[in-house]
């Protein structure tokens, strides 16, 4: 995609994002200070950038896992997802943190959470970089939120427009 960056307005600069992630990492370390290990599940592809920076700033011993899911288009009412890449490990009895790029309607994270809860983890929490609260259709408990953002289409730092722009190092938005 040509000239994508020219169409973007900066929402959070690279420095701001890294500073906010350091705060989240500190908070997560605090909350998990008594546990032996935490399974961190990075939800591909969008959350890859956020997850890597987050875990590098954490002190808690982690196991790094990835999952890739996709929502079935046109099924917003059921919010069903299909798992394109599943975990490599059994999470029963484990402490688990899902790391996702954004919560929008909430359908994806609700379905993912239900799926992972059925595997009987000891605990399950959710971290998102961005929360578009006003778009929410279903309630999902989110434990760590980088930013509550306005209802704009964000691009960069993992967020894509038709797969482009994920590697832009800041979070921008497309002007309407
Ligand atoms: P939800 O099921 O509606 O909460 O969908 C969340 C998914 O929608 C995210 O994982 C993103 O892939 C995508 N998404 C929602 N808003 C944006 C945006 O502003 N930029 C890029 N992707 C978005
Ligand atoms: Mg996407």
Image (cartoon, rainbow, N blue to C red):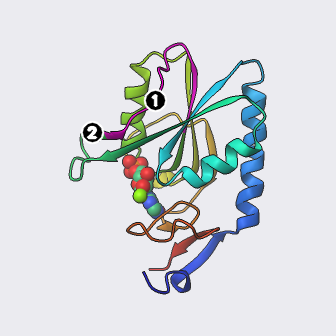
Magenta segment, which residues? 83-98
Residue 153 drawn at (x, y percent): 46, 67
Tell which tag, 1 or 2, sits nearer the viewer.
1
Image vertical order of residue 38 relative to residue 41, above or below: above
Write down the residue under mark 2: 80
On-image quarter of the C terminus: bottom left
- Residue furthest to the top in view is 93
Structural crowding at the residue carrying mark 1, measured as other residues with C-alpha within 10 Å and reported as few (<14), some (14–19) or many (≥20): few
Mark 1 highlights which residue? 88
Q: Where's the N terminus, which quadrant?
A: bottom left
Q: Relative to residue 45, is residue 164 depicted above or below?
A: below
Image point (68%, 46%), residue name: 54
Q: In this view, does 82 lie above or below 160?
A: above
C-alpha separation, residue under disc 1 versus residue under disc 2: 22 Å
| Quarter where residue 49 is shown | bottom right
Mark 1 residue CB less than 8 A from any atom of ligand 1: no
Q: Is mark 1 on a helix, strand or loop?
A: loop
Residue 45 x %, y %: 46, 53
Classify residue 39 as left or right of residue 61: left
Q: In this view, does 108 lie to the left or right of 154?
A: left
**In x, y percent, where is residue 150?**
54, 62
Which residue appears at 50% of the width and 20% of the height? 91
Badge 2: residue crowd in 10 Å (few <14, some 14–19, many ≥20): some
Q: Does the residue labelled 2 lie within 8 Å of ligand 1?
A: no
Q: In this view, does 165 lie to the left or right of 148?
A: left
């Amino acid at each position: 995609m040509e000239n994508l960056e020219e169409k973007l307005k900066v929402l959070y600069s690279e420095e701001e994002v890294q500073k906010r992630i350091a705060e989240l990492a500190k908070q997560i370390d605090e909350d998990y200070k008594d546990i032996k290990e935490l399974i961190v599940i990075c939800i591909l592809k969008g959350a890859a950038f956020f997850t890597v920076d987050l875990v590098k700033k954490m002190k808690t011993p982690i196991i790094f896992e990835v999952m890739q899911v996709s929502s079935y288009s046109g099924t917003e009412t059921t919010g069903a997802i299909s798992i394109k890449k599943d975990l490599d490990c059994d999470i029963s009895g484990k402490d688990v943190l899902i790391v996702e790029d954004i919560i929008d309607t909430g359908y994806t994270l609700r379905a993912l959470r239900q799926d992972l809860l059925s595997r009987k983890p000891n605990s399950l929490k959710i971290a998102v970089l961005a929360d578009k609260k006003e778009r929410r259709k279903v309630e999902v408990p989110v434990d760590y939120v980088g930013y509550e953002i306005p209802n704009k289409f964000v691009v960069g730092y993992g967020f894509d427009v038709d797969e482009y722009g994920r590697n832009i190092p800041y979070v921008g938005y497309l002007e309407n």
